[in-house]
Image: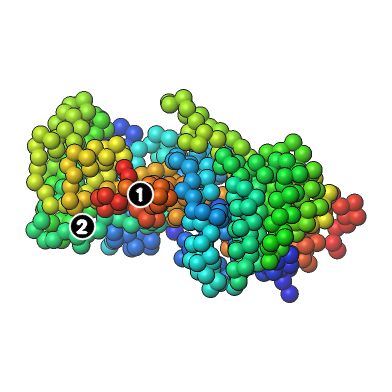
Amino acid sequence: MTKVVHHEQIADKIYELTFEGEMVTDMVEPGQFLHIRVGDQYMPLLRRPISICDVDLDRKQCTILYRAEGEGTLLLSQKRKGVRLDVLGPLGNGFPLDTIAEGETAILIGGGIGVPPLYYLSKKLVERNVRVVHVLGFASKKDAFYVDAFEQLGTTAVTTIDGTLGYQGFVTDYMKQEAPAYDVLYSCGPTPMLKAIEEQLNPDRAYFSLEERMGCGIGACFACVCSVKDDPTGHRYRKICSDGPVFPQGVIQL
Amino acid sequence: MSRFDIQLPGLNMKNPIMPASGCFGFGREFSKLYDLSGLGAIAIKATTDEPRFGNPTPRVAETPGGMLNAIGLQNPGLEKVVAEELPFLADYDVPILANIAGTTTEDYVAVARTVSKAPNVTALELNISCPNVKEGGISFGTDPNVAAELTRAVKEVSDVPVYVKLSPNVTDITEIAQAIEAAGADGLAMINTLLGMRIDLKSEKPVIANRTGGLSGPAIKPVAIRMIYEVSQRVSIPIIGMGGITSADDVLEYFLAGASAVAVGTANFVNPFVCPEIITELEEKLTEKRIDHISDLIGRSWKSCYSPSS
C-alpha cells in the first residue's frame, strides 16, 4: 500500500508528488517507470506511465514529476496528501550504471517532462564518482523545474526555446555551440529531440529513454512497440515498456 | 466440491475464468505476477503462419469506459510460437485455447494443423473477427457462408475442438452463429471488439495510426450480453463470453445471459491481478448466494423454466 505524502505544483502544469510505501525499496535502478492508476473508476481506463524522479530508500519514499495536461494527469493532480495511490512497478529497464567508469564524464540531456528520470540517474552517477554535466531543455522559463537541484549535483546548462531562461534554442543548438566534452551520453525527452541528438552528435556510448502510449506496461499488449534500426525483415521490434524504456544507442529506429 | 469447475469441449477448467486472447501475450509477463495454473484456461495471442509486425503506433486510445486498439495481430509467427511460447506454457497445469488467424483459408488451415498438435493446446479459437487487419480476420467473420466454409476447413485438420470467435460488427449475429454451428464448430467465443474511432482535436486526425480500432472494455459489455442472450437461444454449442468483464458480478451476468465460461480482456491492463482476484471473488459470491454450481446459471435470463434455487 502506498500513500501520498507530498504533492505540489512546481512549474506551469508541472507537479511534484511523493509517495511512501514498501515497494519503493525495489526502486534502485534510475530510468525505470511506474504505472499509476489515476482514478478509481473506469474513466480514464488505463494507467499512466510516469518515470521515477527521485528515491529515498531509507524513508521508502519515491518522487515523481508529471505534467498535468490530459484527462489522466489532471485527475492525478487532484490526489491529496494522505490518500492511497495505486502504483505498479518499478517497471522496465533503466539506465545502466556500470557502463561508465569512475572519473569519466556523463552528459545528461533532458527535454521537458523527459528531465525527471535524469535526476535520479545523476544522483546515482555522482555516488559512483562519475562527473556529471546536465543540459536541460524547456519551452520557456515558466516550464522549467529542478534547475537548482541539478546544479547541486554538477554543471547545469538550461536552454529555452524562447530564451526566457538560460541559453536560447534547443538542447541540440547548445551542444553544437558549446560542444561540452563527455564520455557517455544519457538522454530522455521527445523522440524528435532524441533523433536530433543521435544524428548530430553520433555518440559512441549513449542511452536513450523513449516514451509511447502504453496499454499494460508489462509487455503483454504490444501497444508500445518500436522498430529496430536497420532491420531488412521489418519484423523485428522492441517493446518500450518491457524491453526499454532505456535503449543503448543504435538499437531503435528513432 | 467445486462450485465453478467447467468442462467444455477441449477445456477442462478449474474455474470459468480465462484471460482473453491479445490481452495476455503468451503468458510470460503475467507468470511473473501469479501462478498461471490457477486460471481456468489461457487464450493465447493470435498466431499467424508468418511473423507479423502489426500496425504503426499509436495503437491504443482511451474512450469513456473503454479503449480502442489496433495492434494488428503482431506475433512471432507459427514456428516460434510452437518452438518457444507453447513449451513455456507447458510448465503450467492449465488448458490452452490457441487463437489462430490468417489472410487466406490456407493460412488458417496450416496454422490449425500445426498448433492443434502441440501437446498443451487443448482447443483452438478461430479468429475471424479482428477488425484491425486489412486482409483476413474480419473479412471471414461477416459472411455466414464464408465463416462456415472456413470453420469446416479448420475442423477437418484440427486435432482439438474448435471455437469460433465472432465479430459484433454484423447485422445479425445469430445467423452467422448458426451457420458456424452447422459447419461443425465445437463452441463460440463472443464478442470480439466493436469497430470505432477517436479524432484528436489538435491534429484533427484519428488518434490511432490505423485510423480505426477495436473498442473493448466495460463500455461494450451490454452489447456482448445482448448478443450472447440472443445467440445462446439459437445454438446448442457452448459460448465463451467476453467484453468488459472486471468483476465477479460481471461473470454472473454473462452466465445468466447464456455463457458457459468467460474471458477477461482489457481489465488485465488496468489491474494485472484481475483474473485471480475475480476467481477468488467469484467463489465467495457463489457461496454467499448459495448457488450450488455456476453452470446452474447458464442462460437463466431467458429460460422459461426458471425457478430460484431453494
Q: Quadrant of residue A92?
A: bottom left
Q: Nearer the viewer, residue A70 or B174?
A: B174
Residue B289 higher or lower than B68, as above or below: below
Q: Amino acid at mark 1?
A: Asp
**Above or below: residue B67 compared with residue B13:** above
Q: Position of residue A247 (x, y in %)?
A: 30, 52
- Residue B202 makes an appearance in the image: yes
At a point 10% along the width and 56% down the height, the residue shown is A104
Question: CB atoms at circles 1 and 2 under 8 Å apart?
Answer: no
* Residue receiving disc 2: A124
Disc marking residue A231: 1
Alpha carbon distance from label 1 to label 2: 34 Å
Horizontal arrangement in the rendering, residue B219 relative to residue A73 (left or right) = right
Measuring from the top left, give residue A41's x and y in whole percent.
Answer: 55, 44
The subunit letter for the residue under badge 1 reads A
- At 29% across and 61% down in the image, what residue appears? A28
Q: Crowding near pointer 1: few (<14 within 10 Å), some, many (20+)? A: few
**Residue at the image point whose x is 31% and y is 39% from the top:** A191
Colour pattern: rainbow
* Secondary element at image label 1: loop
